Image (cartoon, rainbow, N blue to C red):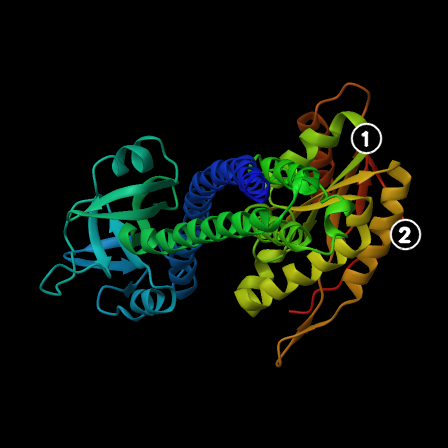
Amino acid sequence: MSENKTSKRRSLVVTLIQIGVIPILLLGIGLTVYSQYSVREGMDYEMERALSGIAHNILSTYNALDGGEFSMKGEDLYKGEKNITADYRILDDLKNDTGNDVTIYYGDKRRMTTIVDDKGNRLTGTDAPEGVIDHVYGQKEEYFSTDVDIQGVPYYGYYVPIRNDAGDIIGMTFAGKPKDSVMLSTHYMVVGNILISIFAILLAAFILYLASSKMVVAIQHIRRFLGKLAGGDFTQKMPDEVLKRKDELAEMGEYAVHVEIALDDMISRDPLTKLLNRRATMVRVENTWENCDFAIAMGDIDWFKGVNDNYGHDMGDEVLKFVAGELKDELEKSGFVARWGGEEFLIGFDGTQEELVSHLKAVTGRIRAKVFDTGEKTFSVTMTMGVTIKQPGEEFEVVMNRADNLLYKGKRGGRNQIVVDGEELDGIPEGIVTE
């Protein structure tokens, strides 16, 4: 009789492990594959943003050095009346500060570059990679590639056209990073995700081994939670009947919640402001748009480029984090706040247009009152907002575009104001920016 009971216990444990571990294993694989794709996609996006900023910064720096055009005199590259070929300090400093290679092209030739060959010689006088000329000169647009071949080495690369006073493209600036160095970081992140998945599977097996048949319901709750998490749903809640348990299953439920928070922060949150990113915003909209009467606002920090140019990008980041924190504290409990790009923010508010405007007046007032101190100078910032309300049957893109148009109407109308369906609201004094 005792042997029969032992056999049954072992059979139950095996069954529980089969029910719990196999699905978790599949979910772990799914999460690993999904996170690998998301990490690489996110890495491509971040590289594009970073390299774009550097390539544009090259132009801004040399324009500040001399307002004249780029031109060639013999083998030397000039900016206005200044021979810049003889002084590599600007480009070398950019490479040292960012870890990225930079190049200035005139025509299709590298005239100044930090890229060197095996002997340490700069690759000046060499041709631009195939395909770049067609995009920049032919299509007259900036160009980003995740696989630029430079002397047999694959690069992430971003190209920005250089135009003369007549508007013709005469050259390009380039910022790039060897792809292998970026992929190494991605590899470590993916390996970490795999290790987390393996740990979660082993933990689940241990808990199930100690469990009884009464724990099946709790296991099913956890399984459903992880299934939704694998599908990118970060709005779900772990049931209280799991978290209030006094055994290992409660710990497993809490661990799953921590994994959700970690993944949400990694995949759904903007790393600087901790607001929702575009991808997470669209997931939120898809899950709630039909069931809520949303008011939508598009907001933009006025003259933000001047903050970066005058006080540095670190101070610009501080401004972004402060503004994001104020918007989040004021509005996230009644909807969502997302960083839509650069210094632009998207707000979805589950309430009336008038209620949203009231909140926006309060938060823009606090933002305007904040004084930022660089140690040498102080300054303040203001915001312009466009606000509208969803009409029955309207798609999200339609409402968002309407709010965006209102925002730009406010920009054209002098900034530092809230514009609601074409009407500029009174009661917001002009902001002050101290140069």
Q: Quadrant of the C terminus?
A: bottom right
**For this view, does 137 lie left or right of residue 149?**
right
Asked whether the viewer can see residue 404, the reply is yes
Which sits in the foreground, 393 or 4?
A: 4
Q: Above or below — where is 109 with respect to 130?
A: below
Give the quadrant of the N terminus: top right
Residue 362, quarter of the rendered image: bottom right
Q: Earlier in the sequence, mark 2 or mark 1?
A: 1
Residue type at mark 1? Cys
How packed mark 1 is, by other alpha carbons closer than 10 Å (few <14, some 14-19, many 20 or more), is some
In the rendered image of this protein, does residue 151 appear above or below residue 60?
Answer: above
Q: In the image, 345: left or right of 279?
A: right
Q: Secondary structure at mark 2?
A: loop
Q: Quadrant of residue 408?
A: top right
Residue most extreme to the left: 119
Please tell me the numbered disc located at residue 292: 1
Q: Which residue is mark 2?
A: 427
Q: What x and y, as percent, mark residue 139?
A: 35, 31
Q: Which residue is at the far bottom? A: 375
- Residue 374: x and y in percent read 62, 76
